[in-house]
Each structure stands twice: as structure tokens, then as C-alpha cells.
Image (cartoon, rainbow, N blue to C red):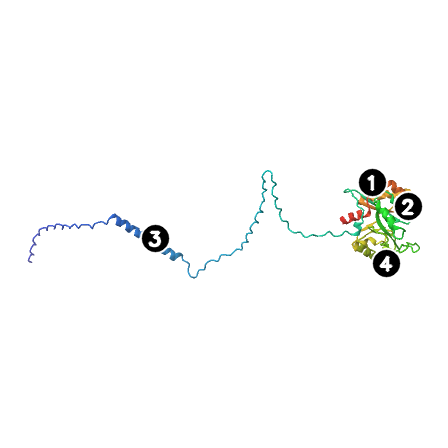
Amino acid sequence: MASKPKKKASKPRKRAAPAKRKRTKAAPVASSGHARLAKVAMGVLVLVALLVAGLIVFSPSKDQTTPTVAKVAVPPVVPAPPPEPQVEAQQAPAGESAPPVPLPTLPDVAYVPDLPKPTWLQNAVQTSVAPGQPMIAVVIDDMGLDRARSQRTVDLPGPLTLAYLAYADDLLKQTGAARLVGHELLVHVPMEPGSASTDPGPNAVLTTLTPEELTRRIEWNLSQFSGFVGINNHMGSKATSDRTVMAEVMAALKQRGMLFLDSRTAGTTIAESEAVKAGIPALRRDVFLDHDPSPIAVRAALLQVEKVAQRQGFAIAIGHPKDATIGALSEWLPDVRARGFAIVPVSTIALHVENNM
């Protein structure tokens, strides 16, 4: 087989030398002033973009509603009244009098007149009593018939309360003398007793009278003298237990502004309660002084009066112009005052009762 011809060894090739790069000249750098302006412009653009983005994000949508703020009622502020102008006193030069300072004008005040006092207060004898001092009113009934003993009673130190019978003689003179020395007056009105055999006297108030005659007799008894504070009953056990009769009596006293003292000649009396119902001052007797007319019994009764006055603050005693009674009172009245008791007319006790109801 024919051999292949041998290849000629090839000569190593020489590496081509790298081509030399051409150096290009760099563009000239912008000046420093232009660079700062570019940075500022870029910052402004960024801020504007941020503001626009914020407005887009936080702007309320059409569906959102503005929240409603509740309105709170605030009370109006009342300004304080301006201070009153003060008038300064100007000192006048020596030898000259100071000009008068004008006085402030006072507001008009409606005048309210005092109401008239009831008759019993107008005719009352005025007395003074210390606070807490026990009071005793001594009432002497049946005055005016026995002129001598009535005068001896008037001569006692007062003030006493003297109850004159409306049918006694010369009443204006007798009652005027009693008032002159400081005693208080009552009308001692005769009323029907429990016993039909006992005569209470002329123009007595009886349960058998017609309304017209009853009114006439009451008016007659109340018109025989003046200056009295009220009435009390002479006898009257039956009359003071009759509601119709007592209502008529109290109506007459109410009209005249008088008080009523219940002598309490019967345990069944309704006189005091009818007086209260009619709205007039009502009093009651506490002790009879001379139911037993002996001197010893009268003095014992006076001691009982003192005990009642100490217990309830006041006491009303009723006696008559009898020798034993007049004699006992003439000794007892100065002594009881010295021991701290006040001798007062019945009107003082009536006023005390009304003020403490």
C-alpha cells in the first residue's frame, strides 16, 4: 500500500501585535453652578410629586360625609351689674360749707295699713309679765247688785277682772269707776240654770226662747255698758249645755270682737268648744274661790289656785263679792305678788293662750 506523503511541518505563526486603541478626548465637564441648579430642580420636582400624591391619597371620597358636630346650648352669660357710682365727699375750702351730697332714690313701697284690733284687745288692761312668771286672773262675779260690797271689791289691789250683771243699776257709773282704778270688765250674762225653780234674773238666755227673742236678749245684755272685753255666764248649767243656744251666743260675740269665759257651772258644758268653733278667744274657770264661803275654805282655794298656776303657767279663779272672799283677797294679793306670781286680767291669759296655740 502506498504510503501517504508526510506533511511538512508548519512554521509557528507569529501573533499579531494588538492594535493600538485610539484615545478619545472626554467631553468637557459642566461647570459647578449648572450642577447645583440641576439638583435644586430635581428636589422641587420630587416635592411637587409628593404633594400631589398626598392630596390624592388623603382627599375624601364622594361617598364620605363630613362628621356633624353636635351643637351644645351654652347659657347666655349675664353680665354683672355695674357698680354703683360712689359719691366722694368733696372737702370745701376753709370757711365754706360742704355742698350737700344727694341721697339715693329709694324704691316706692306699698303702704299696708295695720288691721284694727278686735274689741277685746282694745278694751284690755295692759300688764307686763316676766318670761316664765306664773299668772293668776281673779274674776269676781255678780258685781253691781250689792253696791257696798262691789265697791269694797273695786278697792282691792288689781288688776282684777270684774263681771257686772247686766241688770244691775247705775252700771255706767259703777263700771267707769272700776276701769278708772285699773280693773278689767266682763258682762255677767244670766243664763238658764239646771233647776227650773232657780231664777237667773231678767233677760236671761233660755233654751226655750224663739230665735228672735234669744237674739234680742243677747243684744240687750251686751248693750248695758261699754269697755268690757267679753262675757261669762251667770248660772247657765242648762244653757251652756245647749248647742243651738251657745252657737247663737258665740255668733254675737264674734260679730262684736269679744272673748268668752266659761264659768263651768256644769260638767256637760259645751260653751268653750262652741267658742273655739266660732273663732273667738275661749277661756275656762280653773278654781271656784267661795263655793264654801268660809274664810278657811277661801284661803284653801287660793292655795289651789297657786298650784294650778305653777303647773300650767296660769290659772283663772272665780269668786263673788262676799265678806270672806274680799277679806281673804285683801291679805293674799300683796303676798302672792311678793312670792313671784303675776296678777293679771283675763285678757292677758287669753292673749297668752292664743300665742301658744
Q: CA distance from mark 3 to mark 2?
A: 131 Å
| First in residue order: circle 4 vs circle 1 | 4
The residue where tag 2 is placed is 149
Which structural element holds mark 4? helix
Q: Amino acid at mark 3?
A: Leu
Nearest to viewer (mark 3 / mark 1): 1
| First in residue order: circle 4 vs circle 2 | 2
Crowd band around label 4 with a 10 angstrom C-alpha radius: few (<14), some (14–19), many (20+) = few
Name the quarter where the N terminus is drawn. Answer: bottom left
Q: CA distance from mark 1 to mark 2?
A: 24 Å
Q: CA distance from mark 4 to mark 3?
A: 120 Å
Q: Position of residue 336 (x, y in %)?
A: 84, 40
| First in residue order: circle 3 vs circle 2 | 3
Q: Amino acid at mark 2?
A: Arg
| First in residue order: circle 4 vs circle 3 | 3
Q: Is residue 351 visible?
A: yes
Which structural element holds mark 1? helix
Q: CA distance from mark 3 to mark 1?
A: 114 Å
The residue where tag 1 is placed is 337
The residue where tag 3 is placed is 47
Q: Residue furthest top?
A: 94
Q: Nearer the viewer, residue 200 or 98?
A: 98
Q: Nearer the viewer, residue 250 or 21?
A: 250
Nearest to viewer (mark 3 / mark 2): 2
